[in-house]
């Protein structure tokens, strides 16, 4: 192909150097020569793959124009219905279009190579982080005896999983970048290329594994209330990114390629070992969807049950709750009950709500997917109102007591010091 | 009454005579800008798509070579000059044939002898008022519809 293109360009160069205006030449030969050379240049432009070749072909067009210009009038008639100028303009337009196209391909080609290198580097980092994850999970199992070391391992593992997720989706974005925003409009060849890249990089397998790691992380230990805000954010971020990736995958392939995610030995890959054993089967997109549902379910379940435990441990008899709505109803009901009974709510307000719920769980509860900021603030004000009311009554009571005491003392001293008329009479 | 009819009749006669005279458009240029190189078919016909010219050249083959099939598969070079005459020649031709168009026919006006050995690489160029005949780089002649008009100076 390269050899034939070189020969073509050489032929163009040689032919355009032959002057058509020799002393004795057939008009027909002039016409035919012009047509052949123009066709040759056109063919060379169509076949050109590099800007250097196109630069040389631009010179060929210039030469063709200069050499045949003296016969322009003749060629205008002979080439009818086209003309000499139209033919040259046509070549120049074709050249310009081809130049733009080749420039784009060359620059995009360089960019694609750079991006593929980036994908490769990200893939390696992902592998190393997977190794780190494995060791962290092992460390987590050992660290359960010591609370401080457990907290440290949880923090590191959480950071590792977040970094892995970001890395994975950065890698995916890198794959799609050369094809622009609207993947559905790319050509079938490009779709095949994307599919090949996705399969080669095992993107769906990585997505599944990352989601499985997060599920495993939730199941592996108990968390503090403060941990949940980051975990909810992690789930939301992953879910949003996965939705975007799934749409792109569906755009490039209506039916996902039947490539089962398997181990090199051909056996189905087990993503996680632990309470939930997840096996990847064909149609990994659907598997990820179901795993995302499991992740959400476990996160929500563990969150609300852990929050419920806060009340149970403090012997606060709130109704059982399993989601934001039932939590809100439960707290409102309990507050109403306290108000109605006139029971002392200080313990609940200070020790449970302010010390535990607000400090530990407030950030997570304020998330839209849990309770929402507005609803949480409403509950907080309502619970805070219990304390405020109690404080005001005590203050009045204490104030009245102090005033009564002061009056009593004053009356006592006044009565004691004031002389009787009988006692003053003898001195006078 | 007869004296009045006489001049009117004369006028009518003059007008009628004028109406019957032929209408002629002058300064017509029939010339093709470039010759057509046409391949003779197996049926000894040629056809030019651009100028919509088609004819049977078997009589020409017989006239030139004594064989009506001699031109099959070969190329003929055809050029119409400004006057409307068709100049036809080809490889191995000793003559350039000049034809005048008629009603459904081309009738030979002249056969201009060029070379006893026959032309090796002929070409016809439009060089009004003549047609230029080239044969490679060695021969160049200006032709009118009837003859060679001048020898080019070398």
Image: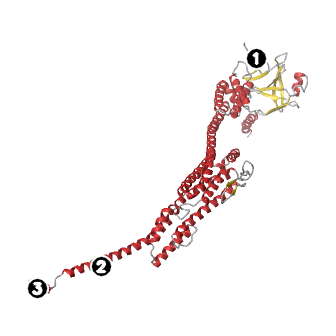
> What chain does badge 3 belong to?
A
> Rounded to the nearest whole Å, what is the CA distance between mark 2 and mark 1?
141 Å
Residue toward you, A224 or B111 = A224
Discs 2, 1: same chain: no
Which disc, if any, is residue B137?
1
Which disc, if any, is residue A404?
2
> Rounded to the nearest whole Å, what is the CA distance between mark 1 and mark 3?
172 Å
Location of residue A372 in the rendering, given as x and y in whole percent from the top left corner: 52, 63
Question: Height in image: A229 above or below A36?
Answer: below
Which disc, if any, is residue A270?
none
In the picture of the structure, the residue carrying the numbered disc 3 is A425
A96 relative to A407 in the view: left or right: right
Q: Looking at the figure, which quarter contains the C terminus of chain A?
A: bottom left
The answer to whether the residues at label 1 and label 3 have Cβ atoms under 8 Å apart is: no
> What chain does badge 2 belong to?
A
Q: Looking at the figure, which quarter contains the N terminus of chain A?
A: top right
- Identify the image quadrant of residue A69: top right
A378 relative to A326 in the view: left or right: left
Question: Can the viewer see residue A225?
Answer: yes
**Residue in the picture at 49% in, 75% down:** A336
Discs 3, 2: same chain: yes
Q: Is mark 2 on a helix, strand or loop?
A: helix
Location of residue A228 in the rendering, given as x and y in whole percent from the top left corner: 55, 60
Q: Residue furthest right?
A: B67
Question: Height in image: B66 above or below A249?
Answer: above
Q: What element carries label 3?
A: loop
């Amino acid at each position: 192909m390269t050899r034939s293109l070189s020969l073509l360009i050489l032929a163009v160069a040689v032919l355009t150097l032959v002057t058509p205006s020799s002393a004795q030449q057939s008009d027909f030969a002039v016409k035919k020569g012009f047509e052949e050379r123009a066709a040759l240049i056109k063919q060379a432009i169509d076949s050109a793959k590099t800007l250097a070749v196109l630069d040389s072909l631009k010179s060929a067009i210039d030469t063709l124009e200069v050499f045949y210009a003296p016969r322009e009038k003749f060629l205008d008639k002979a080439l009818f219905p086209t003309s000499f100028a139209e033919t040259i303009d046509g070549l120049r337009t074709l050249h310009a279009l081809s130049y733009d196209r080749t420039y784009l391909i060359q620059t995009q080609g360089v960019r694609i190579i750079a991006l593929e290198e980036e994908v490769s580097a990200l893939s390696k980092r992902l592998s190393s982080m997977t190794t780190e994850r494995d060791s962290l999970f092992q460390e987590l199992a050992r660290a359960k005896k010591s609370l401080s070391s457990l907290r440290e391992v949880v923090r590191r593992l959480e950071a590792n999983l977040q970094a892995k997720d970001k890395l994975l989706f950065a890698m995916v974005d890198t794959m799609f970048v050369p094809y622009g925003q609207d993947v559905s409009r790319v050509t079938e060849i490009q779709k095949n290329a994307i599919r090949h890249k996705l399969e080669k990089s095992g993107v769906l397998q990585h997505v599944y594994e990352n989601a499985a790691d997060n599920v495993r992380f939730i199941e592996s230990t108990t968390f503090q209330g403060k941990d949940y805000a980051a975990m909810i954010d992690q789930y939301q971020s992953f879910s949003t990114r996965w939705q975007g990736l799934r749409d792109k995958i569906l755009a490039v392939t209506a039916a996902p390629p039947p490539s089962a995610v398997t181990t090199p030995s051909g056996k189905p890959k087990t993503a996680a070992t632990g309470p939930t054993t997840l096996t990847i089967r064909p149609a990994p997109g659907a598997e990820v969807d179901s795993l995302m549902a499991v992740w959400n379910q476990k996160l929500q379940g563990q969150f609300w049950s852990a929050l419920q435990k806060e009340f149970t441990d403090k012997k606060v008899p709130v109704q059982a709750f399993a989601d934001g709505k039932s939590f809100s109803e439960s707290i409102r009901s309990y507050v109403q009950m306290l108000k109605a009974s006139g029971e002392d709510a200080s313990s609940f307000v200070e020790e449970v709500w302010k010390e535990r719920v607000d400090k530990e769980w407030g950030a997570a509860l304020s998330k839209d997917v849990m309770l929402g900021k507005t609803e949480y603030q409403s509950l907080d004000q309502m619970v805070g109102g219990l304390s405020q009311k109690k404080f005001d009554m005590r203050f009045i009571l204490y104030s009245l007591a102090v005033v009564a005491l002061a009056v009593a003392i004053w009356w006592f001293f006044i009565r004691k010091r004031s002389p009787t008329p009988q006692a003053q009479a003898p001195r006078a | 009454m007869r004296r009045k009819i006489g001049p009117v009749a004369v006028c009518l006669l003059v007008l009628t005579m004028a109406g019957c005279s032929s209408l002629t458009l002058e300064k017509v240029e029939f010339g093709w800008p470039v010759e057509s190189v046409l391949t003779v078919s197996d049926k000894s016909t040629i056809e030019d798509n651009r100028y919509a010219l088609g004819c049977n050249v078997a009589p020409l083959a017989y006239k030139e070579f004594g064989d009506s099939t001699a031109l099959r598969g070969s190329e003929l070079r055809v050029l119409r000059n400004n006057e409307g005459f068709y100049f036809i020649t080809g490889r191995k031709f000793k003559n350039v044939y000049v034809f005048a168009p008629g009603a459904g026919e081309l009738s030979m006006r002249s056969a201009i002898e060029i070379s006893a050995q026959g032309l090796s690489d002929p070409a016809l160029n439009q060089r009004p008022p003549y047609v230029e005949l080239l044969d490679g780089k060695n021969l160049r002649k200006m032709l009118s519809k009837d003859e060679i008009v001048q020898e080019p100076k070398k």
